[in-house]
Amino acid sequence: MSRRVAAQIDDIEYLSILDETGKVDKDLEPDIPEDILLNMYQAMLFGRRFDERMLKLQRQGRIGTFAPIKGQEAAQIGSAFHLRKTDWLIPSFREAAAQIWRGATPQDIWLFAAGYNEGVNIPEGAHDLPLCVPVGTQLLHAAGIAYGIKYRKEDGIAMCFHGDGATSEGDFHEGVNFAAVYGLPVVFICQNNHWAISLPLSKQTRSETIAQKAVAYGIPGIQVDGNDILAVWAATKEAVERARTELCPTLIECVTYRMEVHTTADDPTRYREEDEVAPWRKRDPIDRFETYLKKKGLLDDKAIKDLNDAYQEQLLKAWDDTEKRIHELDSADPLSIFDDLYEESPPHLEEQKAYFKNRLQKEAHNG
Amino acid sequence: MSRRVAAQIDDIEYLSILDETGKVDKDLEPDIPEDILLNMYQAMLFGRRFDERMLKLQRQGRIGTFAPIKGQEAAQIGSAFHLRKTDWLIPSFREAAAQIWRGATPQDIWLFAAGYNEGVNIPEGAHDLPLCVPVGTQLLHAAGIAYGIKYRKEDGIAMCFHGDGATSEGDFHEGVNFAAVYGLPVVFICQNNHWAISLPLSKQTRSETIAQKAVAYGIPGIQVDGNDILAVWAATKEAVERARTELCPTLIECVTYRMEVHTTADDPTRYREEDEVAPWRKRDPIDRFETYLKKKGLLDDKAIKDLNDAYQEQLLKAWDDTEKRIHELDSADPLSIFDDLYEESPPHLEEQKAYFKNRLQKEAHNG
Amino acid sequence: MAELNMIQAVNLAMREALADDESVVILGQDVGVDGGIFRATIDLIEEFGEERVIDTPLAESGIIGMSVGMAVNGLKPVAEMQFSGFAYQAFHQIENHVARFRWRTSGRFTMPIVIRMPYGAGVRALEHHSESREAYWAHTPGLKVVIPSGPRKARALLAASIKDPDPVIFYEPKALYRSFKEEVPDEPETLVIGKAEVVRAGEDITMIAYGAMLPRTMEAAERLEKDGVKAEVIDLMTVSPLDEETIITSVKKTGRVLVVHEAARSFGPGAEICARINDKALFYLEAPVNRVAGYDIHPPYFAREHHYLPSVARIVDEARETLSI
Amino acid sequence: MAELNMIQAVNLAMREALADDESVVILGQDVGVDGGIFRATIDLIEEFGEERVIDTPLAESGIIGMSVGMAVNGLKPVAEMQFSGFAYQAFHQIENHVARFRWRTSGRFTMPIVIRMPYGAGVRALEHHSESREAYWAHTPGLKVVIPSGPRKARALLAASIKDPDPVIFYEPKALYRSFKEEVPDEPETLVIGKAEVVRAGEDITMIAYGAMLPRTMEAAERLEKDGVKAEVIDLMTVSPLDEETIITSVKKTGRVLVVHEAARSFGPGAEICARINDKALFYLEAPVNRVAGYDIHPPYFAREHHYLPSVARIVDEARETLSI
Ligand SMILES: Cc1ncc(C[n+]2csc(CCOP(=O)(O)OP(=O)(O)O)c2C)c(N)n1
Ligand SMILES: Cc1ncc(C[n+]2csc(CCOP(=O)(O)OP(=O)(O)O)c2C)c(N)n1
Ligand SMILES: [Mg+2]
Ligand SMILES: [Mg+2]
C-alpha cells in the first residue's frame, strides 16, 4: 500500500488520581510514604502562606513586582519533590513554592523583590538556578546543565519549569529539541495555568494539549491534572526515572490555573471573567489534598491550624529579617554595583567606580 | 477512568504514488491534465540543466557560492505548480527550479550569484520573495504575507519552502505556530533532503518524521515521497485547498535527498559515504517521471533530446546575457551601493556617497 | 487640546493612524484585549477590531518576522516589544530582514514597520526591564531610531514614524509614561524624523539629551541658569540618523558640550556624537565633550538603580566641570 | 615552530585547550564530523570524541543557551556561530544571560564561554556573510570582544579567551583565515586580553586597527614611510575592554590619529576610540581623529564589496589628510 503509516503516534494521556472532591482513584493511587505526603502538604501550605504574605508586602509598597503562585502549588511540589539535592532545579519566575522547598529563603526572595541584587543568593553547592525572567530561555540552560551531568556520567537530572506561554517561544522548541537529540536527563514541567498575562491558551496555540508538542521531538509527553498532587507526583516519578535511567527527556503538562494576577502590575479584570475563575476555586490543590490526608488520618484541623500559625510567625520573622537586611544594605555604600561583572574589573570600570565613589561623597556632602 | 485520552493524535501518513521504477499506484494516481504533466516535466528538466550549468559556472570561478538543487526537482515543482500568479512563493535558498517556474530568470539568478545586488530583481506585481539565506526566518514572512491575504479577504495562499535543518530553528516553531493560531492560508513545504550541511537528519531531531511536528501546532502534517512528483502534487493539492478554503496551514514533508554538495563551498566526502548516496541515484525524480510519461505516451526519447538541446542553448544564451550585464555593471559607476537603504537618503549617507565618488575619481586618476 | 501623559499620547498616535490608514495594524503581546501592559493600546481593539489590533503568541521573533511578511504584503505593522530587553529574541529578524528588505530588493519590497519598545530604568521593574540599548539599533544600517522626551513629541514622532516608509525603532522612555502631562493638539501633528530641536537657547554650553534624560537635563540647565550659566539644550529626538547640523551649529557657538544618556557609556550614543563633533568642530572645542552616561554595568536592581542613572546633580556638576567653574 | 595560517592556528588553540582541560568542549553547527565549514575544528572530533566536539542541530540560540547551562554546570564551552551574521538568532541568550550570569548571581555561576564567530567581508560570500558588527558586543557590559589580526595572535588570544573566566566574543576575520602564514610556537602561548600592541613604532601619526584591517594598515604605514612619514600602528586585539593606556600614550606622542575598521562608521568602534581620546588627550590633537571605516550601508554583494572596505590607498590618503600633507 502506498498510502501507509509513516509514524505511529500514540494518543496523549491525561492522568488524574485525586479529584476535586478529594476522592482518590484507588487503582492509580501511588504508594507515597506518609512522611513524604505530609512534607509535601507542608511545602504547599507554606508556599500558599508565603505567597499571600508577599502579595500583601507588595500591596503595601514594600517590595516590587512579582508573580504569585496561588493555585499552582501542587504542580510545583508534586514534581520538585522527586529532586535529589544533587539534581538541578531550573525555574521560570513562578515557582516560589518549589524554590523554597529546595532551600531558597523567604528573606532572599523578598530581598530580590525589594530590588536588591543580593537577594539572588545561591549557596555554593546548591544546584538551583535563580529565577529566569526572559520567557523560555531557561529550557536551553536545562539542556546544557543536563549535558554536563551526562558528560561526567553523573546520575543527576535537571528539572525545568515553564509556562504555557513559554511554549510559543523559539527557545522552548530549541531547548526540548536539544534535550531530545542528545538524550539528556531533563524533565520539562509545563505549568499550563491557561494564561500568559492576558493571552488565553486558545490563542497561544492551536494544539489541543501542550503535552502533544512532545511528539514534535520524539519524546514522551503527558498531560496531568496539575491541581492533583498525586497525579503530578506519579507522572513526574515516571519521567524522572526515564531521565535518570534512559537519558530521555519528558514533557509533562500540568493543567492548572493562575488564580491570581499575572504579576502585581497586572489587572486581570480587563481580560477574564470571574465566571471562568470560579470553577477553579473548587479545584484548589491544597483543599483536596487536605481532604485526602484527613481521610488517611494524617491530618486534622488542629494540625492544620498549628502549621498555619507556625508559618505565619515564621513569615513575620522573615520579613523582620528582610527589613533588617534592607536597612543594612541601604546604609552600606552602594559601590557594589560595580562588582561581579567580570572576575577582574577592567581599568575603565575601576575608573568609573572611583568616579562614582567620588560622586557619592559629593552628594553626601551636599545633603 | 482517570487515565484517559487527552488528545487523540492521528498517525502520520506517507504518500507515494509513482515508485522508483516508474510504476504508478492506480488507486492513488491523480488526475492531472496532460499539458500540466508535460509542463511539470519541462520545469523539472530545465531545473536540472540549469543547476548543472550553474555548478559548472561556479567551478570555473564565474559565479560564487550557491546551493544546487539536484534531486529535489519533484519536491519543488510538484508543489509550486499549484500556485496561481497571485499566490505567494516564499523560498529558502534551494528552490531555483520553483523560482524559475514562477518567472525568475537564469540571468538574474546568476547575476546574484556573481555578486551583484541587481540579481535580486522581482518585477512589480510578482508575488515572489527573493531567496532567504538565514535559515528558517522565512516561515514567519510567509505567515505575515498570509495574514495580509486573510486581512484583505483575498483568496490567495502563501507557499513556504524550508529544509529539514530549518526545523530546528526557533523561527520554524514560531512561524508554524503563528500560521496555525491565526488560521492562515500557508502551505509549508519541508524539503527533507536528509542533510543540513554535514548534519544528518538523525542528529537534527529525534522524531521519526518531520511531518509529525505538525502535531505540536494542531495542524495537519503529511509525509510524501519527495522524489515522486505525483505524490507531491497530490498532497500539495489537498493542502492548498485546505489553505484556500479552510484557512488552515499544512506541513508537508517531502522526503528527498541532496544529491550534490550542500553549497559549492562544501565537501560532502568529509561526512557521507557514497554507499548512502547510491540508492538515491536510482530514485531520481526525473527518471521515474520520464518513465511514467513515456508509458502515457506523452514523451519519447526524441522529445527529451529536443528539450535538452533547447534548454542547453537557452542556458548558453542566458550566460551570454549575464556576462553582458556583468560587463555593463562593472563599467557603470558603483555609486549605487549607497542606494535603496532608505526611501530618502539621510545627510550623512549623502556625505559618504560624495566622499566615495571623490575616492573613485582619485583612484581612477591614480591608475 | 487635551492634557495627555505620554502613554495616552502614544495611544492617540496609534488611534489616529488606525483611523487614517487601513493598512496600519498593531500587533504584540497583550496589545489587544488587555490594552497593552502599559495601556499604550487601550481601547484600540474595541474600536478597530481584533484583525487590526492583534494579540500575538508569546514570541518576539514571531511578531517581527510576521511584521516583515505583512509589510511585504502591503500592511504597515506597528509592532510592540513588551520591553526593549526582550527585543533581542527578534534581533535576527530585525538585522537580517527589517533593516535590509528595501535594500536587497532595490526598493521592490519596503519595510514601513514601526517597532515600539519601552526602554530604560525608573519604574521599579524586574531584571531585563531597565536597559537602554539604542546604540545597537543606531549602529544598524537601514533602521531609524526615534526617542521622544514628552507626550506631545511622542504623539507627533510616532505619527511620523508610522507614516515613514522605512523601519523605525521607536524607543519609549517608560519612566516618562506617566510622569507628566502636556497639551497635545487635537489636530494631527507630526515631527520630522532626523531633526533635533534646540529646546533651550544658550551660549555657554551645549547639552545634548533625549528621552528620559531630557527633562533632567532641562532641570540641570535651569539650575545652572541661577549661576548665570546659559545652557543650550538640544533634544535629539532621532538618535539615528543624527541631526549633525543642529549639533554642530550649537557646538560652534558654545565650544563646550555635555551629552547625557542613560545607555552605558562605552560604545554608546555619546561616543558617536562626540566623534561627529570631532569630525566637524574639533577646533571649536574648549573642553572635551563630556559624556554623562550610564556606567558600563548592568543597571542594578531597582533599589540602587538611581545610582546608575545620570542625576540632575551629576549633570549640573559635570556641566560645571566642562565649564571649568 | 610551525608555519600556520589563521584557521590552523585557531584549530591549534582549540586542540591544546581540549587536551589541557577536560572541561573544555566545542560545540556548533558542523564542527564535528565536518571539521567546521572553514575547517577550524578539523580533526578534533577524531581526537577528542563526539562528547567533547559536539555537532549541534541548526539552532544558534540553542547553541548559546546550551552553553550557558554547560557553563553553569562546570564546563567551558567554546561555541561556534557559523557566521557572525547568524549570531543574532542567539542575541537574547548572549545579552540576557551570557553577559549577566556572573553579575546576577554575585559570582556564584560564571560564564567561561568563548563564542567564536567568523566576521567580515572578503571571501566572495553570500548575503549576511560579510558584516562586521563587533560594536554590538562591545556595547554589552559583561562581555569581552577579542579580534586577532594574524595566525600567531589568533592562537595566543584564543588560548587566553578559553582560559578567561568570563565570556569572550572571539571575532575571527575570515578574510585572513588563509591569507598568510606565520610561525606559531610549538609551546603554548597566550596574550593578555585587554592589552593592545604597538606593532610599529612611529611619531607622526597613530594608526589604530585590528582584525582584517591590520595588515592593510601596516601596508599603508609602509607606503607612508616612503614619503618619510613615521606611522605608529596599534593592533587593538581586544576591542572591549579597550586598552586606553596604549592608545592615549601613542596619541599624546603623535597628536594625529587614524582609526581603521570595516564595521559601519556610525556608532561603530571608531566612535568610542575617538571619544576616549577626546576624554583623555583632546588638547594633544592636531587634527580630528580620522575614522576610516565601512560606510553606513550594508556591505554590497561581493562584486562590489571592495568598494565598501577601507583600502590601503584610502588609508594612505586619509593619513595624508590627517597629516595635512
Ligand atoms: C522573552 C520575554 N517576552 C516577554 C516577557 C514578558 N512576560 C513576562 S511573563 C509573560 C507571560 C508568561 O506566560 P506563561 O509562560 O504562561 O507563564 P505564566 O506567567 O503563566 O506563569 C510575559 C509575556 C518576558 N518576560 N520575556
Ligand atoms: C540562521 C542560519 N544559521 C546557519 C546558516 C548556515 N547554513 C546555511 S544552509 C545550512 C543548512 C540548512 O539545512 P536545511 O535546512 O536542511 O536545508 P538544505 O541546505 O538541506 O536545503 C546552514 C547551517 C544560515 N544560513 N542561517
Ligand atoms: Mg501561563
Ligand atoms: Mg536539508
Image (cartoon, coloured by chain):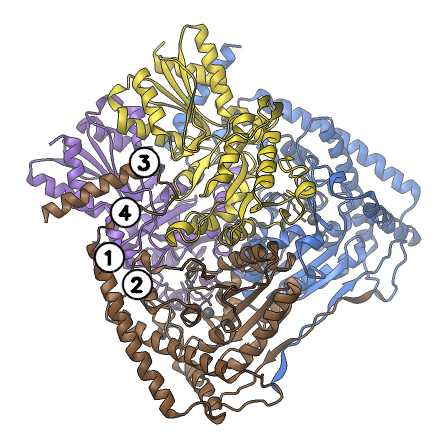
Chain colours: A blue, B brown, C yellow, D purple
Q: Secondary structure at mark 4?
A: loop
The residue under label 1 is B329
Q: Can residue C30 be seen by looking at this rendering?
A: yes
**Label 4 chain ID:** D
Q: Which element type, helix, strand or loop, lies under badge 3?
A: helix
Q: Amino acid at mark 4?
A: Gly
Which disc number belongs to residue B111?
2
Label 1 lies in ligand 2 vicinity (Cβ under 8 Å) = no
Are the numbered discs 2 and 3 placed on the same chain, yes or no? yes
Query: Numbered disc 1: what chain?
Result: B
Same subunit, labels 1 and 4: the answer reads no
What number is the disc on residue D211?
4
Q: Earlier in the sequence, mark 2 or mark 3?
A: 2
Look at the numbered discs 1 and 2 and tell me whether their residues touch, using CB distance below 8 Å.
Answer: yes
Asked whether the beta carbons under mark 1 and mark 4 sit within 8 Å of each other, the answer is no
Q: Nearer the viewer, mark 3 or mark 1?
A: 1
Image mark 3: chain: B
* Element assignment for label 1: helix
Q: Chain of mark 2?
A: B
| Foreground of the two, A244 or A366 | A366
* Front: mark 3 or 4: 3
Residue depicted at 52% across the width and 27% down the height: C153
Left-right relation of A239 to C72: right
Q: Give percent across and percent down for residue A229.
A: 79, 54
Above or below, B165 against B18 in this view is above
Check the image and report above or below for B95 versus A107. Answer: below
Q: Which class describes the residues within 10 Å of circle 2: few (<14), some (14-19), or many (20+)?
A: many
**Ligand 2 is within 8 Å of the C-beta of the residue at disc 3:** no
